Image (cartoon, rainbow, N blue to C red):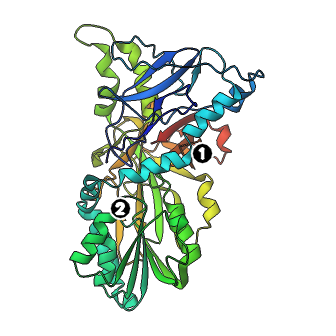
Amino acid sequence: RALAMATMANAWSGALASAWCIRVPRRGPMRASRAIRTGSVTFEANRFGSKPIIGTRTRTTAAAAKKKNKEDESESYTFDYDDDTDFDDADESGGWVEDGELSVEELNAINDARADTNADGTYFDSYAHIGIHREMIGDAARTGAYLAAIEAQSDFLKGKVVLDVGCGTGILSMFCARAGARKVYAVDASGITRHAKRLVKENGFGDTIEVIKARMENVTTEDIPEKVDVIVSEWMGYALFFESMLPSVVDARDRFLAPGGLVLPNVADVRVALLSDQSRWDDGLGFWKDVYGFDFSSLQAQTKRDWSTDPPVATVKSECIVSDPAGSLVTSTNCATVPLKQLYRPMSGDVVLEFSQKDSKAVHGMCLWFDVDFYGKATLSTSPFATKTHWYQTVLMFDDCVVMEHGDKIVASIELEPGSDPGAKRQLNVYCNYDVVKAGDLVTIKDRDDREFFAQWTVQ
């Protein structure tokens, strides 16, 4: 998706000048990190050409803050972005590496620079670009599902009031107006609203659709002075909850939706299935065994770490799914009733994934996708067996493959946790505790911490 570049100077009051930007929402080739060391602290910065772009995986800890009791000993740090500068990528934790110690003041300055407000600003700015909206509107499965759902509710919509949360170009607002809505409030925090306002007028809905440029949480009854009958929003991210936009929709629901009103979509499910993808495994790991006659196999460990810290979002071939094609339900969210506070807590579910192939195969991980429903009037699936969408599927690779035979099972407890670090609240952490159960053996109920294997991924 759209590349958002943002610069923050003097984050440490004359001591530190650094550049920060946000990851591409849902999609985009922003990778290749390098460590840049000067002074007594190490930072990680991503690279795009010769310009630094955001690294959101860094983390500070309370333990680090407690290490130093002395005050007023902060030093000046200089960053050298010369591509010829030697660097050491030995830091395999994905977080801060300390050659010295950081004061509490320094840690606070870092976290302030990476605050949610700064991350949100660049997040919304990224949606000001036309390209990302061209991709979304051009996704026929996505846009067609919303059109079908809105047209199926045309009798209910006639003469009613609609709130479109994250309206973008206003396409869903125009669907609602064309279906008979009396008034549509179209809210978006990004600069795309300047185009939405023009498009609304050019298509004859200037008197029906009112475009409001604001964060949904900042919209008040002065902006929307009446209750709405329908809330529509395309809020879904990778693995459903990446981007953490659903809380904005639920906040709008709690404050503006009239009793008996509709939330489109009203149900969202996360599903998972076993993945056998030898080609992906070989491309990622086997490639390093012979690189023009050299042995680069020590990089296999880093590839596995990359699979964990930034799992692939890609099209998964349906033949790579080796358990029930319908997937196993991890969690289901009723957008019309879910309490707002619940969305900030981990969501979890237990699944039994039975290997369904006749011949034994190596299972390399799991494939995760989501489905949404619009009161039974329309559905949208991002399954490998459904029409391709711009969400693709989220690939959760294991560190070690598991050879399975017909009837073998992976019994797993899967947890989806919204990001909580400063500037990282739109990330999604996925945790999986699992056992491998042979065919015919009893599947036992266990506490997740008692399961034999553990894996985790960060969707970002």
Question: In this orientation, which residue lies closer to the viewer: 289 or 198?
Answer: 198
Q: Does 158 appear above or below 346?
A: below
Q: Is 112 situated left or right of 192 in this image?
A: right
How crowded pointer 1 is (Cα within 10 Å; few <14, some 14-19, many 20+) is rated as some
Quarter of the rendering occupied by the C terminus: top left
Q: Which residue is mark 1?
A: 420
Q: Amino acid at mark 2?
A: Ser
Tell me the residue at 56%/68% (across/down).
251
Tell me the residue at 26%/70% (across/down).
198
- Tell me residue 128's x, y (percent): 33, 55
Kindly report the distance in space between the C-alpha atoms of the residues bearing marks 2 and 1: 28 Å
Q: Is 420 situated left or right of 120 in this image?
A: right
Q: Which residue is mark 2?
A: 381
- Tell me residue 181's x, y (percent): 36, 86
Q: Does 49 appear above or below 448?
A: above
Query: In the current view of this chain or complex, which residue is farthest to the front?
Result: 14
Residue 445 seen anywhere in this rendered image of the structure: yes
Question: In this orientation, which residue lies closer to the viewer: 438 or 446?
Answer: 446
